[in-house]
Image (cartoon, grey):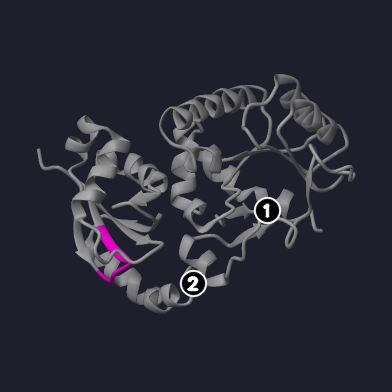
Amino acid sequence: MEYYDAAIGMQIGASTEKLLGFRKIFVAGKDFKLVDMDFSKEDPKNSIAMGKTSLGLLKASRRFAKGIIPVEIDVDKRVVESIKENESMLLIPLNRIVSTYGIVRARNIKIASKVLEYALKRRVSVGFITMASSETQLMSFMQLIELAKLIGAPEDVARAGISEINERIGEATP
Amino acid sequence: MKRKYRYILVMSLKPLNGVDERDFYAELMRLIGELHFAEANPKIARQISNRLFVLKISLSQYEEAIAALALIKRISGIENAFYTIYASGTLKAIEKYIKSTNMGSLIESNLN
């Protein structure tokens, strides 16, 4: 099984990818098109959409975005339903867990668990990414799998969620 | 019953020169909890370079330790990160992995 990750606003060399155990770490803007639904008016069709508000994410999934990244993890159930209906993928950004501390981190883990639980119950396609914006937010594929398990993903779902993002992010070329 | 251990090859983002080993254990304990830490019984089994070391940890707490290592972002007051590169049941296998992947030159050519 080959593993993939996605990052934003940073340069990643082939040696880093190899060391961390990834086939490729996709970088937003360079390797895939990322549309911020809170600020951009761009059409998210066939790209990856991110946003803080459920309204923007709902719009993105209805417009056939290949993947949806809820920046603050917390998403409305309607968004999850829409992702399922439009055969998109829910991409859970684990940097929200890695880059926070204490109570905030505990809260984010709880939120991510609830979102993931609902998505798995509704059989929505789920992916796990670091969405790292700095080297301190990067992690190895082993750590990504364990963090996915920490929020409640079974081992096979965690592994598949890190492997299958290639089919979504890899096709969302800029 | 004999306790089983796993060896995890860990790489730090920044060199660990001057970092007190106890600070690393304290941070690990903060994340996995005192009771689990006792069960985990972590120990730096081998320091390979100033950015690469092998962590020996109880098999029962191995997965928690990998997740906890991802969450450490500061050690001895300095921003840092720890990446788990490889894991095995024996130190010999780790050494073999380091040799086969030419780890030294890979580290040289990335991240810093």
Q: Chain of mark 1?
A: A
Q: Which residue is mark 2?
A: B110
Question: What is the three-letter code of the residue carrying label 1?
Answer: Asn
Element carrying mark 1: helix
Work out which quarter of the rendered image holds the N terminus of chain A and state it: bottom right
Can residue A94 be seen in the rendering of this structure?
A: no
Q: Residue at x 48, y 38 (%)?
A: A100
Q: Which residue is mark 1?
A: A166
For the residue carrying disc 1, how many other residues have a C-alpha within 10 Å: few (<14), some (14-19), or many (20+)? many
Q: CA distance from mark 2 to mark 1?
A: 23 Å
In the rendered structure, does residue A9 fall within the stretch colored magenta?
no
For the residue carrying disc 2, how many other residues have a C-alpha within 10 Å: few (<14), some (14-19), or many (20+)? some
* Front residue of A53 and B85: A53
From the top left corner, tell me how far across and down residue A111 is, in percent.
55, 25
Element carrying mark 2: loop
For this orientation, the residue located farthest to the left is B1
Residue range corresponding to the magenta coloring:
B48-54
Question: In screen coordinates, is B49 left or right of A48?
Answer: left
Which numbered tag is attached to residue B23? none
Can residue B49 be seen in the rendering of this structure?
A: yes
In the rendered structure, does residue B52 fall within the stretch colored magenta?
yes
Work out which quarter of the rendered image holds the C terminus of chain A and state it: bottom right
Q: Are marks 2 and 1 in contact (CB under 8 Å)?
A: no
User: Is A109 situated above or below B13?
Assistant: above
User: Is B32 situated above or below B84?
Assistant: above
Question: What is the three-letter code of the residue carrying label 2?
Answer: Asn
Tell me whether marks 2 and 1 sit on the same chain: no
